[in-house]
Amino acid sequence: MRCRRCGDKAVLKIPRHNTAVCVACLNHYVLEQVKRAIHDHKMFDPGDRILVAVSGGKDSLSLWDVLMRLGYETAGLHIQQGIGHYSEESHRKTAAFARSRAVELIVHSLQEEEGAGVLELAELTNRSACSACGVMKRYNFNRIAHDRGFDVLATGHNLDDEASRLLGNILRWQEDYLAKQAPALSATHEKLVKKVKPLYRLAEREITAYAVVNSIDYVIEECPMSVGSKMLVNKEVLNRLEADAPGTKHAFYFGFLERQKAEDLSGADEKIQSCARCGQPTTAAVCSYCRILEKVKTAP
Amino acid sequence: MRVVLQHPRRETEVRGAKTVGQLLKKLDLLPEAVLVIRRDELMTEDEALGEDDTIEIRPVISGGDLDALSAVR
């Protein structure tokens, strides 16, 4: 198979765009899609300081790599979850990536800062590990980005992530979540930092290919807590539809974004206030983070 | 040929697949969900395979916390 753009040997077929690309054209394609995402959703400007949430997986490390290639000023933020070997490996690969490119990496250990890792937090609060992890990540991503003066927080969510989440939200008609599912979420509270997903135009397979051809050493191992998750099932279903009709995921998610824009489902009317205990933004009187930490403090 | 699969990491021997596309069919894998790698290089579905090849099949799907940004609560 030859590259449709330059005629060299292709390394990736992209059926949804009816094309195939070589290594150089894959890199060009990925960079152009990210540039377009940043432009279309006014994610950030040259000169803005971007904090990239990095797990050590293919998406976040590729995102960090792309943003550096595009010349943006970035630093990474890694949350150490305390999930045994998986977390140790994730930290090791993230730190090695940052070292090799001489960029700043902020590491936040839940064990050291909150006094308990994800598994203990989940047990103490009767939440699932993913739910406890989500609260800890959301809170710390935002607080650290705000306290350290970053203009924006970038995450590595890709087209498959967004399409499968959309499918999950629609299947249960979670309309309040639909309003918040956007490639860019503006800061609607003085302590809330703008959040962006510059990879939303790229499929998971395209980003993995980018990581492979650029020798980005990411954690291939999956988080042991994600086994059997609904998101993985949704992704598999969407991939089956995609195999039958290339472009399905793109049409599904981008069709949603068009309707969201037309109907102004931006979630701007959501009431965000300051947590009575910590002052961080929340929609409740006391935020989930403080409610979880309360359980840690009172644990026997 | 020797095929290395991930999640969990395991190895298997596959015979009779002449191309990457045939190999994926034999293993009942969706091309959209994996990448096929030989000697650190990505392969497209039409590429020929040799019986002495060692092939890695790497899943591209990850679970992650997809609700990480869904709320500020």
Image (cartoon, grey):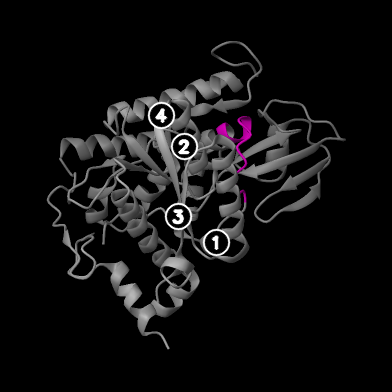
Q: What is the magenta segment's predominant secondary structure?
A: loop
The magenta stretch spans residue A60: no
Viewer-side residue, A166 vs B65: B65
**Residue nearer the viewer, B55 or A70:** A70
Residue A63 image label: 2
Q: Give the mark, 2 or 1, whose residue is nearer the N terminus.
A: 2
Q: How many marks?
A: 4
Mark 2 residue element: helix
Q: Which residues are magenta?
A: A210-220
Report which residue position mark 3 lands on.
A231
Residue annotated with mark 1: A227
The image quarter containing residue A156 is top left
Disc 1 residue type (three-letter): Val
Say if mark 2 contacts mark 4, CB within 8 Å.
yes
Residues marked 1 and 4, same chain: yes
Q: Earlier in the sequence, mark 3 or mark 2?
A: 2
Q: Earlier in the sequence, mark 4 or mark 3?
A: 4
Disc 2 crowd, CA 10 A, few/some/many (<14, 14-19, 20+)? many
Q: Residue A141's x, y, as percent?
A: 36, 53
Q: Residue furthest top?
A: A6
Q: Which residue is at a point 43% across and 25% down the rendered structure image?
A: A70
- The residues tagged by marks 1 and 4 sit, at their Cα atoms, a distance apart of 29 Å
Query: Is residue A217 highlighted in magenta?
Result: yes
What's the residue at 32%, 27% (across, down)? A46
Q: Tell me if A106 is positioned left or right of A215 in this view.
A: left
- Identify which amino acid the numbered label 3 is placed on: Met
Labels 3 and 2 touching (C-beta < 8 A): no
The image's mark for residue A34 is 4
